[in-house]
Image: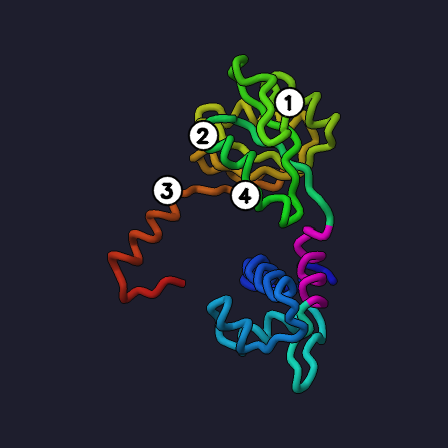
C-alpha cells in the first residue's frame, strides 16, 4: 500500500488506531465494530469506516473488524513493525525523562545513546543507555546506526546540533528545543512545542463555543 494514497487527516489518526487495536489485542478481543472504535478514538463510526477502508477490506459482516489484522497493517504503514534506534541530544531534565521513557520500547523505538556538552555527564549510564560528549555525536550515530535524534537542548544550541546531524546521515529529528525547525531537505523533522499546545488548550478553555477540533 502506498502511503501517498491515504489522506493526511487519516494519516494523522494512524497512531490513535494503532493504540486502540493494540489495547484490544492485549485484551484478547478478536473483532471490533466501527462503533466501538469510534467511541474509543472520539470519531463518528462513518469516519472510522472510511479511514479503515484505506487499509483494505477487513470487516466481516456480523463480526466487525479483525483486530490483530488491522493492528499489523497499521503498524506496517507507520513503520513501527521494525525497531527504530534513537539518540537523545541534551541530557537536562527533559532529556533524561525522554531517554528513560518506557513507552518508546513498546511502540518500536529504542534509545541507544545520549549526548551532552557537559563533560560531567559523559560516561553516565541511564537505564543502560550510555551518555557521550556532544563532540562524539557523528562517530557514535554512524557506529550505532541511529535512525532518529530527539533534540532536548536549549533553543540556542539548535543550529549547532542540526549542523552536526547533517554529517551523520540521520533520517529523522524530533525537536523539543522550543524553536520551530523549518522543512529540511535531508532530514524529516517533527517539532514538538508544549507551550504551543498549552496555548491551544488555553484558547479552547477561553472560547468554549469554538469546539476543540
On the picture, is 61 further left or further right than 195?
Answer: right
What separation in Å lies between label 1 and label 2 (alpha carbons)?
20 Å
Q: State whether residue 139 is above or below residue 58.
A: above
Disc 4 target residue: 190
Q: Nearer the viewer, mark 4 or mark 2?
A: 2
Of pointers 1 and 4, the one earlier in the residue sequence: 1
Whole-percent x, y for residue 57 in the image: 71, 76
Q: In the rendered structure, does residue 69 fall within the stretch colored magenta?
A: yes
Disc 2 target residue: 93
What separation in Å lies between label 4 and label 2 (alpha carbons)?
21 Å
Q: Mark 4 near mark 2, Cβ–Cβ under 8 Å?
A: no
Dot 2: element: helix
Please state which of residues 165 and 103 is positioned toward the viewer in this rendering: 103
Q: Mark 1 near mark 4, Cβ–Cβ under 8 Å?
A: no
Dot 3: element: helix
Q: Where's the N terminus, which quadrant? A: bottom right
Characterize the local packing of mark 2: few (<14), some (14-19) or many (20 or more) Cα atoms within 10 angstroms. Answer: few
Residue ID at (59%, 37%): 173
Of pointers 3 and 2, the one earlier in the residue sequence: 2
Magenta residues (range): 68-81
Q: In the rendered structure, does residue 47 fall within the stretch colored magenta?
A: no
Characterize the local packing of mark 3: few (<14), some (14-19) or many (20 or more) Cα atoms within 10 angstroms. Answer: few
Characterize the local packing of mark 4: few (<14), some (14-19) or many (20 or more) Cα atoms within 10 angstroms. Answer: some
User: Is residue 11 at least partly visible in the picture?
Assistant: no
What separation in Å lies between label 4 and label 3 (alpha carbons)?
15 Å
Image coloring type: rainbow
Dot 4: element: strand
Residue 137 is tagged as 1
Disc 3 target residue: 195
Number of numbered callouts drawn: 4
Amino acid at each position: 500500500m502506498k502511503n501517498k494514497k491515504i489522506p493526511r487527516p487519516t494519516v494523522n489518526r494512524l497512531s490513535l488506531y494503532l493504540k486502540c487495536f493494540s489495547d484490544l489485542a492485549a485484551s484478547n478481543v478478536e473483532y471490533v465494530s466501527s462503533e466501538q472504535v469510534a467511541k474509543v478514538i472520539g470519531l463518528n463510526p462513518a469516519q472510522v469506516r472510511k479511514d479503515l477502508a484505506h487499509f483494505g477490506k477487513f470487516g466481516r459482516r456480523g463480526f466487525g473488524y479483525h483486530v490483530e489484522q488491522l493492528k499489523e497493517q497499521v503498524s506496517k504503514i507507520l513503520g513501527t513493525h521494525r525497531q527504530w534506534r534513537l539518540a537523545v541530544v541534551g541530557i537536562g531534565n527533559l532529556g533524561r525523562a525522554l531517554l528513560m521513557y518506557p513507552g518508546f520500547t513498546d511502540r518500536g523505538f529504542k534509545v541507544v545513546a545520549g549526548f551532552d556538552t557537559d563533560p560531567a555527564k559523559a560516561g553516565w549510564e541511564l537505564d543502560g543507555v550510555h551518555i557521550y560528549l556532544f563532540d562524539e555525536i557523528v562517530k557514535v550515530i554512524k557506529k550505532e546506526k541511529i535512525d532518529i535524534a530527539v533534540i532536548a537542548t536549549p533553543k540556542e544550541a539548535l543550529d549547532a546540533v542540526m549542523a552536526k546531524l547533517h554529517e551523520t546521515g540521520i533520517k529523522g529529528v524530533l525537536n523539543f528545543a522550543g524553536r520551530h525547525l523549518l522543512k529540511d531537505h535531508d532530514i524529516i523533522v517533527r517539532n514538538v512545542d508544549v507551550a504551543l499546545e498549552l496555548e491551544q488548550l488555553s484558547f479552547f478553555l477561553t472560547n468554549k463555543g469554538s469546539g476543540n477540533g
